[in-house]
Amino acid sequence: MSELIVKCISLNMFGMNSYIISKDDEAIIIDIAKLTFGYDDYKKLLDGKKLTKIIYTHGHFDHISGSDDIREIYPDVKHYAPKLDYNFFQDANLNASAYFGQPITCKEPEYKLEENDIITLKDIEFKVIHTPGHTHGGVCFYTKGYLFAGDTIFSAGIGRYDLPTGDYDTLIKSIEEKIFTLDDDTLVYPGHGEYGFSLKQRKKLNLF
């Protein structure tokens, strides 16, 4: 049985980790920012594999700003976003781009994700875990051994909670009750910075 392959693109104007995850001849993308020099890197990293889905951990502009551009290249691929962050795609205030003086809106995704929904990649199932706090609709995607955490938690910190719909206490509760309860050897792939660290390593830091 072939293994899950995870590749990352972070060379965008926001330094956001966009993940290309593949198994055999199929792939999905998690979060996509606008790229300054085009989208050829995605084609290269997909390496001929069929792109089946584009999914989003939350609705902040740095994680969704490339969605309209990627639609031009892969017009038949459907997009999936957290139900509670669905309106972020059409609201520059909610997605925080207006806050930074660069209002961005994007076409709304075709599908809304909720707690315990399943995203499939060949025979692999990613469970949707609702982890509010960074935004009220933020989610992580989990399959045994891998957690794609968006901006919920980083290698040495946690996500912001001072933007629209964010809340510190809610974020800490999400981390303690929904992330730190997963297996210690789970590898974490966050939305920014270092990736591929274990939950065991992260817990030792005890940084909130």
Image: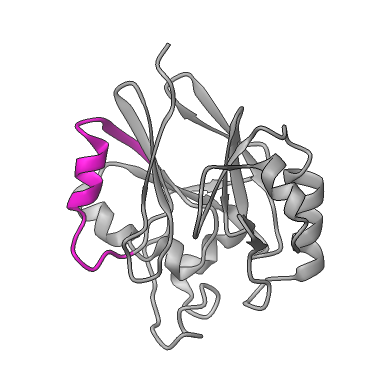
Q: Is residue 16 left or right of residue 161?
A: left
Using the image, determine if residue 60 lies above or below residue 178. below
Question: Would residue 75 be visible to someone looking at this image?
Answer: no
Q: Residue furthest bottom?
A: 101
Residue in the image at 34% along x and 71% along y: 13
Residue in the image at 18% along x and 64% along y: 37
Q: Is residue 174 or residue 136 the one in the foreground? A: 174
Residue 192 is a magenta residue: no
Using the image, determine if residue 94 lies above or below residue 22. below
Residue in the image at 31% along x and 61% along y: 11
Q: How is the image coloured?
A: one colour
Residue in the image at 20% along x and 43% along y: 43
Report the number of discs: 0
Q: Is residue 74 or residue 190 the one in the foreground? A: 190
Q: Is residue 119 left or right of residue 208?
A: left
Residue 48 is a magenta residue: yes
Using the image, determine if residue 85 lies above or below residue 50. below
Q: Is residue 156 or residue 160 the one in the foreground? A: 156
In the picture, which quadrant includes the N terminus?
top left
Q: Is residue 9 left or right of residue 171?
A: left
In the picture, which quadrant includes the C terminus?
bottom right
Q: Position of residue 143 (x, y in %)?
A: 59, 31
Q: Position of residue 158 (x, y in %)?
A: 66, 63
Range of the magenta residues? 34-53
Question: Would residue 193 be visible to someone looking at this image?
Answer: yes
Using the image, determine if residue 107 lies above or below residue 125. below
Q: Position of residue 144 (x, y in %)?
A: 61, 27
Q: Position of residue 6 (x, y in %)?
A: 41, 37
